[in-house]
Image (tube, helix red, strand yellow):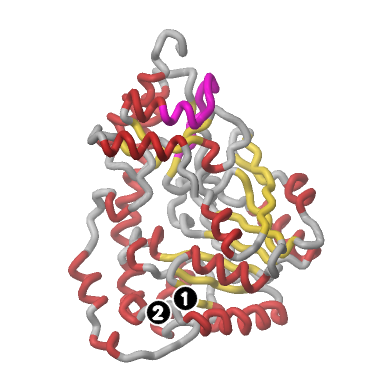
Amino acid sequence: METNRFSQALAEIRAAGVPIFDLTLSNPSRAGLRFDAANILTALSSPKVMDYDPQPLGLSSARAAVIAYYREHGVEVDPSAVLLTTSTSEAYSHVFRLLCDPGDEVLVAKPSYPLFEFLADLQDVKLRGFSLLYDHGWQIDFESLKAQISDKTRAIVVVHPNNPTGSYVSVEERNALMKICREQNLGLIVDEVFLDYGLEEGKAQTFAGSNEALTFVLSGVSKISALPQMKLAWIVTSGPQELRTTALERLEVIADTYLSMNAPVQWAAPVLLEERRSIQPQLMSRVKANLDELDRQLESHPQCSRLAVQGGWYAVLRLPAVQSDEDLAIALLREKGVLVHPGHFYDFPRDGYLVVSLIVPAEEFCLACESLFSWFAQPELS
């Protein structure tokens, strides 16, 4: 519960009323996007919401909308394999509870999203990290992964594409992961919330419907339709028939125990998912424009660079490691009014990395980057 130095500095700056360029923006509902609010609100006000129909997997109409989404990705999903949850965080909790007893272990890539540590702690699960390596792009370090497997390992988590590296799991990596999971009797948990935001053709291939190993694909409208406030997510389970059947039976018991999905959002699910057709082009246009602007400004600052990104909403900057990432982020906040995430938030193995959001409105993003890079234009850093 302790507040770290970075959070303390941010609280002080905000309390003083100092303007901040926020390059950590992750909330799409505050990113200046154009939503069809009337259509969404109408869908939420359906008279059907007055009836209570406690379906552990979720209402069939809502699950049908999810199935239709995967059909557009070229995969036919069995309706019995879809389980609705209020968030991907809840989905992780369900799958951790399904696969693990207290003290069991789950392998997670590093760098990656810091939420996993909290979710694992809440489920009494231990995380063990394996490395992503960078060499003109990110790759899974399979030697590192294999070295972390023990008799307590129950699952491997991959984020496809990864947050914050923006790297998709390649076909070769996918095949290797499936082989390991089959041989070691492990579950494969695949977080695909950023799947649709690919910058390269052919990378956004869903894991849904994979039968090589017991696989749990997690996603939701938080990113797909940029509607995190609607609290609609899901788990799609696939794999060898016996393992899949047993997993689905037990997941249904877990879901039935909580019955957390609310009726308005379930009835509105088709409309909420349809919103992606308008929102995703807006977001992709902004991400690409901001990447172009970032690269343009980097040309004037050769001591700084960005790492390759294949998809998602973030970019990783590699910078001179003249101080810790936390010290640098605090200095940028106090002296330049620019809020960025230090790399250690995402378990980068060394200093010299900052993470910036690419969904910031373009004009603000341009000004924020100018202010950020002016720090590195100082004579002692040039």
User: Relative to 317, is 12 on the left or the right?
Assistant: left
Query: x and y percent of residue 378 in the render?
Result: 40, 12
Judge the density around disc 1: few (<14), some (14-19), many (≥20) Cα neighbours within 10 Å: many
Query: x and y percent of residue 376 in the render?
Result: 42, 18
SS for dot 1: strand
Residue 364 is one of the magenta-drawn residues: no
Judge the density around disc 2: few (<14), some (14-19), many (≥20) Cα neighbours within 10 Å: many
Q: Nearer the viewer, mark 2 or mark 1?
A: 1
How far is mark 2 from mark 1, CA to CA? 8 Å
Q: What residue span does the magenta drawing correspond to? A: 315-330
Q: Residue at x 56, y 47 (%)?
A: 112
Q: Residue at x 48, y 23 (%)?
A: 304
Q: Is residue 312 above or below residue 74?
A: above
Q: Which residue is mark 1?
A: 84
User: Relative to 143, is 381 on the left or the right?
Assistant: left
Q: Quadrant of the C terminus?
A: top left
Tell me if residue 172 can be seen: no
Q: Nearer the viewer, residue 277 or 100?
A: 100
The furthest residue to the left: 38
Tell me the number on the disc at residue 62.
Answer: 2
Query: x and y percent of residue 40 in the render?
Result: 24, 70
SS for dot 2: helix
User: Relative to 60, is 343 on the left or the right?
Assistant: right
User: Residue flagged by tag 2: what amino acid is it?
Assistant: Ala
Q: Residue at x 77, y 62 (%)?
A: 152
Question: Looking at the image, is mark 2 or mark 1 earlier in the sequence?
Answer: 2
- The answer to the question of whether label 2 and label 1 lie on touching residues, with beta carbons closer than 8 A, is yes
The furthest residue to the front: 2
Q: Residue at x 58, y 37 (%)?
A: 348
